Amino acid sequence: DMASALGVQIARPLGYSAAVRAVWQAELSGIPPTDIIDAGNYEAPMTAIGHCLAMLHAADLPMQKSITRKERLADVHKKSRKLGQMLPALASDLEAIIARAQSELTSLPPVQETVIHGDVHLGQFLITADNALALFDFDEWTRGDPAQDLAGLIVDPHVSKFARNKTELNHTLPSDVARVFLASYRSHAGWTLRNATIAWHARVQLLNKAYRGAIQLEPRWREKASELVALATKDIQLE
């Protein structure tokens, strides 16, 4: 079945509503990776997640919709304008980031379209009591650029520190997480994704997360938006 193919546990489905496009699932208990990942404990969970995403992207699953890089950038462009209105001090940086993403878009390698999760972050996984990996949230599954999913994991350590109410993040942890995760993914994937493509999606995802935190008025949303936008102005370190 799909869970076995992906090397994960998936909560048993209980029912489906076509009207609201929702699946109800049985309870599946575990520990979020964000609760255990730190400077001394990230290799095992990130290796497992890398393997899971490689298997997901290789899966032959029917999908009725897809998303292109151009569509994703257009969506984030709209969000960045709204964010700039909420935080005018960030407006010029936001415009520069979008301009860079638009310029780089034409030089990226062609998309190797696969099934993608569409909303990958560490909160979509649990570590179960028997040390297995569980995967959640199937609402955004579609066809698209697999680098979009990889970027979601690479950006997440910068985002999840706010959810965990940390004031500082171990400065080497995001690059360590990225290194282990990408090495695991690439060892199981049957294709090559260039760092430039992953970095492009990571920059777009940073803006997406900055906007989401602001529009939902999350705790420390101004600080979060400022930090994520500042990261997006820099070169994304993947190795």
Image (cartoon, helix red, strand yellow):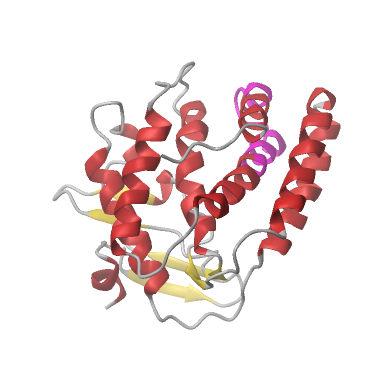
Can residue 35 be spotted in the picture? yes
Q: Main secondary structure of the magenta part?
A: helix
**Does the magenta portion include 210?**
yes
In the visual, does 199 lie left or right of 50? right
Instruction: Report the span colored magenta.
Output: 207-223
Q: Is residue 29 visible?
A: no
* x, y percent for residue 215: 71, 38
Q: Along the horizontal axis of the image, is 189 left or right of 20?
A: left
* Location of residue 73 (image quadrant): bottom right
Query: What residue is shown at x 61% (from left), y 49% (from top)?
Result: 200
Compared with 160, 65 (above or below) is below
User: Where residue 94 appears, x then y in whole percent?
Assistant: 77, 36
The residue at the point 59 percent across, 51 percent down is 201
Of residues 56 and 125, the one nearer the viewer is 56
Q: Is residue 171 above or below residue 55?
A: above
Residue 13 quadrant: bottom left
Measured as percent of width and height from the top left, residue 195 is found at: 50, 50
Q: How far from the left and from the top, in percent, is residue 97?
A: 74, 39
Question: Is 153 on the left-hand or right-hand side of 143?
Answer: left
| Foreground of the two, 235 or 137 | 235
At horizontal 42% and vertical 33% (from top left) the residue drawn is 174
Is 15 rendered above or below residue 42? Answer: below
Tell me the quadrant of the picture where the N terminus can be found. Answer: bottom left
Magenta region includes residue 51: no
Q: Nearer the viewer, residue 2 or 192?
A: 192
Tell me the quarter of the image containing the C terminus: top left
**Could you tell whether 94 is left or right of 140 in the image?**
right
**Picture residue at 50% right of the left edge, 56% below the top:** 194
Q: Measured along the vertical axis of the image, is residue 26 above or below residue 35?
A: below
- Residue that extends furthest to the top in the rendered view of this protein: 167
